[in-house]
Amino acid sequence: MGFRRKDLLGTRDLSAVEIRTLLESAESFKEIAERPLKKVPALRGKTVVNLFFEPSTRTRTSFEIAAKRLSADAVNMSASTSSVVKGESLVDTVDNLQAMAPDIIVVRHKFVGAAHLIAGRIGASVVNAGDGANEHPTQALLDLLTISEHKKLEPGLIVAIIGDIAHSRVARSNIWALTTLGVTVRVCAPPTMLPRGLEEIAGVKVCSRPEEALEGADVAMMLRIQLERQDRLLFPSVRDYARIFGLNRQRLEIAHPDAIVMHPGPMNRGVEITSEVADGKRAVILNQVSNGVALRMAVLFLLGGQGS
Amino acid sequence: MPKINKNIICDSKEMDRILARIAAEIVARNKGCRKLALVGILTRGVCLARRLQGIIREISAQELSLGILDITLYRDDLANATHHPVLRKTEIPFSLDGATVVLVDDVLYTGRTVRAAMDGLIDFGRPQSIQLAVLVDRGCRELPISADYIGVEVPASPQDRVMVRFKESDGFDLVTVTPRSAFQGE
Amino acid sequence: MSKNNPSLLLKNGRLIDAGQNLDGKFDIFIVDGKVNEVATGLDVVADQVIDLGGLWVLPGAIDLHVHLREPGYEYKETILSGAQAAVAGGFTSIACMANTNPVNDNAAVTRFILEQARTAPAKVLPIAAISQGMQGEALVEMGDLVEAGAVAFSDDGKTVPNSKLLRHALEYASLFKKPLLCHCQDNALFADGVIHEGVISASHGLAGIPSLAEEIDIARTIMLAEYLRVPVHICHLSSRGGVELVRAAKARGVRVTAEATPHHLFLDERAVADLEYREPLDETAKPSMLCYNTNTKMSPPLRSAEDVAALRQALSEGLIDVIATDHAPHEATEKAVEYDLAPFGVVGLETALALALRLVEEGDLTPLQMVARMSLRPAAILGLNSCGSLAPDMAADLMIVDPEREWVVDPQKFHSKARNTPFAGWRLKGRVVKTFVDGRVVFSI
């Protein structure tokens, strides 16, 4: 029952019960953001280290606020200030960190499996805040929390994920979590950004055109396109991408009339999503951000008593 | 299953009588108070608070605000909790500033729950005063806390098991004490 | 009979020798480090007699693909430690790749390797680079290198991207009757890949290396050899497509040979993320890092289960001529990093024989075929005429194997300096108990 793990490394191996427990707990934490005094003593005396090897102001800030609202001591350690720049290995960095007895480590790293490597080596709980193109479980869970405010997360629901699937940890974590709950997931990407065989591997429907993915969809989840990928021959031009894969008002018409529009941020306005849609009444992009804090509070809280 | 020797402290009829008395005491003591509210501590304190709210509505035609408080985040034993705490939603749909709050719980024991509840309440505002109503006071306090309204006093040892059941959650009203000796051989 | 080299009689062993097509109870008489006579019930006077009581006697295994790291990376492995690992695994000759520092692209380095090898327990056969500095730009001085003792040419670890250079290398090497051992890989398709492009790369987001990256280059290499009518050897086949290319080429009469490594014959891509993949692990010897085990990172990568089946089939049919280990030692801290950052390669010398015996047990190979893949064929490819078989007059390079002896792979007990095996914790059956080189015991358990 519930959620009893030392670490949250991904959604791939979470059960439906665990996912629902996390979402229900997050639901309870939303209320704290509305209080005049947005702080509870649950993790008083615990140390949460935000270990970010990749810059990400948003995710780091969200975790930091979550930790502080739980009264944990949140310490930020970014690659530029850490000894990583001096050529220290991840293992050495982690061993040093371990010696300072943190309770929870939130890690963002550009390589797959970095969080797993740390978790296997350290007594503290580890939260994966993104490892390469693999997983970003708290993003997926906050997306689910946001969806659940508008739709029932159950079989029959259709979520369309559109963008660079191959290189997206957000897509992967969402795919695992949503399919575990029986939700229908459609993915759509330029063929150069779609892993071969994903249909069978992940139990999703692969659509070649966004129109096909969006038809009757309840949720349109747009992914950030990393513009530097253009240099790697993955797409010919931003203009071409926006024209074929971008979400605009006309394309959104194809979706269910009550469909919601999501984006993990930061957005490339005018590329994967037009400003009209991003700022429109069906966009829940800012709800995703507020839910991120509640969800991360729930994660830190549920892990907080388990580590060490 | 061996027959367990339970002592019934109060049944449904007795509970109605006790609650009516507590309600009356709350009204009497807070006569003229403009901002009086009940806050139930999850889970059974909420049940109790709802009952008191209903009785007070009948006897004094006053509609008291009702809040729900989950004290999980304020517990002082979170770090070494062996069972996993389930978090539920706190709802305080009114301002606590300047209010007189009656905290409601089913059993008063070590006092730690009440301590946590007071910390929790204060995070929502600055009440004028906080009073405490409990159905059962079983003694064995570990903190300097006492109740303002007490249904029954049941001196019990830490090994004894005090159980409270409500119609709303359990289908019947009942308070029992099961002495430790009854569990042996269980 | 000199006192330095006493005569030896091995009695009551089961001799399995593909070179003589023998599998049965034979006695072997060894004089002056060479096989003198092989017969049943040999009645000769020997300085020493060993009764093997039914243990197996096999020609020493020959590995035409190892990395000994010396000169330059002695912290990973030395010629001595690599040779010690070899004899512990039943290998009596090992051919070492050129990607040392400096690269073995000139006679001085070749001579240095041979000099270092003089005190090593196994025969060390240097493989010279194909191109100077393995830069793929200019040919090495092949004649000079052959004279110094190079047995083959390879830029292993890298492909030779320039087809004109590869053509000339094939032509030139044929003059000396030395094989080219080709590591086939299309660099652009390989890109920054770290694992097979398949199920795990798709689900875990690790950059994939398509089988195609290897197959395109195998096709190019075979076409060159076919056009030039020269032999070529393809290193570490890993995919079904590669097998099919070799199959078709052999059917056309192209002089192509191929090898497969034990890890490609036993592991598939799932080992990377350890999904439902713990079967052979001994519970008491579980490696510490089950997820994203960098000891599953090698080039070519572990491919799909289907590819593994195709490789086994090809090995069984003889399309794959040789089992070679691609023994690639790395120091522990080099592998204790993020998967992307870990160097490619795993060690193999000390587990290869027991894994090959498992192929026998699982019916993929007969014992004679196993010996052919590990001794006879590699000797033939490298043009070694004094080893690979235990026929009379051949060097007495052999191993005594206890086929029933079970053991658990414990990297801490390796003779190699390195511990980077993907087989840690595997329970294996069959172990080398004694190894002889030129009639002398070089390893004894």
Image (cartoon, coloured by chain):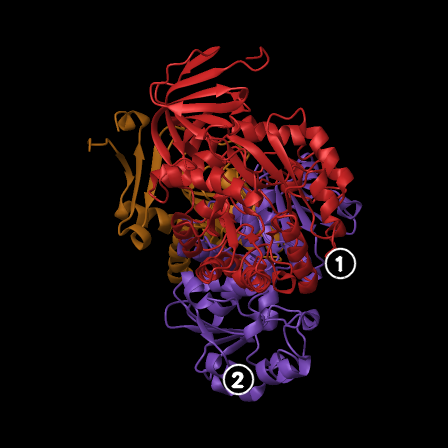
A86 over B46 or under it: above or below: above
* Residue A38 makes an appearance in the image: yes
- For the view shown, which residue lies furthest in the bottom direction? A250
Q: Which chain hosts label 1? A: C
Q: Residue at 31% of width from left, 34% of height from top?
A: B177
Q: Is residue B27 left or right of residue A73?
A: left
Q: Residue at 53% of width from left, 58% of height from top?
A: C201
Q: Secondary structure at mark 1?
A: loop
Q: Is A288 in front, or is C43?
A: C43
> Mark 2 packing: few (<14 Cα in 10 Å), some, or many (20+)?
many
Q: Which chain hosts label 2? A: A
Q: Secondary structure at mark 2?
A: helix
B2 over A144 or under it: above or below: above
C189 over C359 or under it: above or below: below
Q: Colour of chain A?
A: purple
Please provide percent x and percent y for residue A71.
Answer: 64, 47
* Numbered badge on residue C137: 1
Q: Is residue C64 left or right of residue A238?
A: left
Q: Colour of chain C?
A: red
* Residue B89 makes an appearance in the image: no
Please provide percent x and percent y for residue C404.
Answer: 36, 27
Q: Is residue A285 left or right of residue B20?
A: right
* Numbered badge on residue A252: 2
